[in-house]
């Protein structure tokens, strides 16, 4: 170091050194802050392959469903009037679609009178199998519905429906909300999906008691109030 520096020069040199130290410290702090903000980039969740042996469920091409509702027979005439009202349609498929929609609307209209409900469905991937299952279901429910009543106060309306593609189903037979959703789905049926539809009344006239309904339709369950 040069011992001949004047006091002013010594002061200037000290100030310069202090500034350099402050700038270095500030730079170090800035680098630390940048590193903290940057951090490691979040990694995308790893793809989880299906477990070995997991079944593959292809979409069903055809669907058979049977809806059976028992309600107060006093309102049967009201439902029948909606089903038999004149139509402006001439296409047979359109007429059947309208019949399904009318049945769903009529049953929704007497929801307060529902007493028992039954539902069954089957997925089918072959047209011939779908036609055979539909015919078998019709034969079964016509046979069970054709017998005379016992003077009870209830009646049963069964809708046997075969469609292209799966329709909405239920997982409980005593829940009004699910029955409402099921019938609301049938209101959306279109001609392109329909393969077959039939309504079957039980009994043909008169009424059924609840014990007799349970005997003839053991798949039906009481609906929660």
Image (spheres, rainbow, N blue to C red):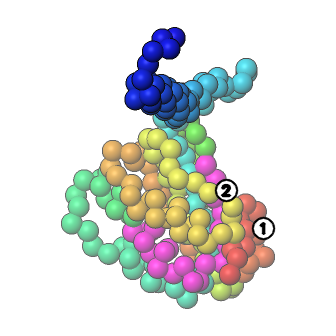
| Residue at the spot of label 2 | 171
Which numbered tag is attached to residue 215? 1
Q: Is residue 145 left or right of residue 29?
A: right
- Tell me, yes or no, whether the highlighted magenta stretch contains residue 34: no
- Tell me, yes or no, whether the highlighted magenta stretch contains residue 116: yes
In front: mark 1 or mark 2?
2
Q: Is residue 203 above or below residue 26?
A: below
Which numbered tag is attached to residue 8? none
Q: Is residue 211 above or below residue 61?
A: below
Question: x and y percent of residue 70 in the render?
Answer: 62, 74
For image coordinates 27% across by 73% down, the residue present is: 86
For image coordinates 66% across by 69% down, the residue present is: 175
Count of numbered labels shown in the rendering: 2
Tell me if residue 129 can be seen.
no
Check whether the beta carbons of the residues at disc 1 and disc 2 lie within 8 A of each other.
Answer: no
Tell me if residue 181 can be seen.
yes
Question: x and y percent of residue 183 in the render?
Answer: 49, 64
Question: x and y percent of residue 60 in the render?
Answer: 53, 35
Q: Is residue 205 above or below residue 128?
A: below
> Which quarter of the figure has residue 224?
bottom right
Question: x and y percent of residue 83 in the render?
Answer: 39, 72
Kindly state the secondary structure of the residue where label 1 is placed.
helix
Label 2: few (<14), some (14–19) or many (≥20) C-alpha neighbours in 10 Å? few
The C terminus, quarter of image: bottom right
Give the CA separation, mark 1 to mark 2: 22 Å
For image coordinates 44% across by 49% down, the residue present is: 196
Residue range (magenta): 102-121
Residue most extreme to the bottom: 74
For image coordinates 45% across by 45% down, the residue present is: 163
Q: Is residue 205 above or below residue 140?
A: below
């Amino acid at each position: 170091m040069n011992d001949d520096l004047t006091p002013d020069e010594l002061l200037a040199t000290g100030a310069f050194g202090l500034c350099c130290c402050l700038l270095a410290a500030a730079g170090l702090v800035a680098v630390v802050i940048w590193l903290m903000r940057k951090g490691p980039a979040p990694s995308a969740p790893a793809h989880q392959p299906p477990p070995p042996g997991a079944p593959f469920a292809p979409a069903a091409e055809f669907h058979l469903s049977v809806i059976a509702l028992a309600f107060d027979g006093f309102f049967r005439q009201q439902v029948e009037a909606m089903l038999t009202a004149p139509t402006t349609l001439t296409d047979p498929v359109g007429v059947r679609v309208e019949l399904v929609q009318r049945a769903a609307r009529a049953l929704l209209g007497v929801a307060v009178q529902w007493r028992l409900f039954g539902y069954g469905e089957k997925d089918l991937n072959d047209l011939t199998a779908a036609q055979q299952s539909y015919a078998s279901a019709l034969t079964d429910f016509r046979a069970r519905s054709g017998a005379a009543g016992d003077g009870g106060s209830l009646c049963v309306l069964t809708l046997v429906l075969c469609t292209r593609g799966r329709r909405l189903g239920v997982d409980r037979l005593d829940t009004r909300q699910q029955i409402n959703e099921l019938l609301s789905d049938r209101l959306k049926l279109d001609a392109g999906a329909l393969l077959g539809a039939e309504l079957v009344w039980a009994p043909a006239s008169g009424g059924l008691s609840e014990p007799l309904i349970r005997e003839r339709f053991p798949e039906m369950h009481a609906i929660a109030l």
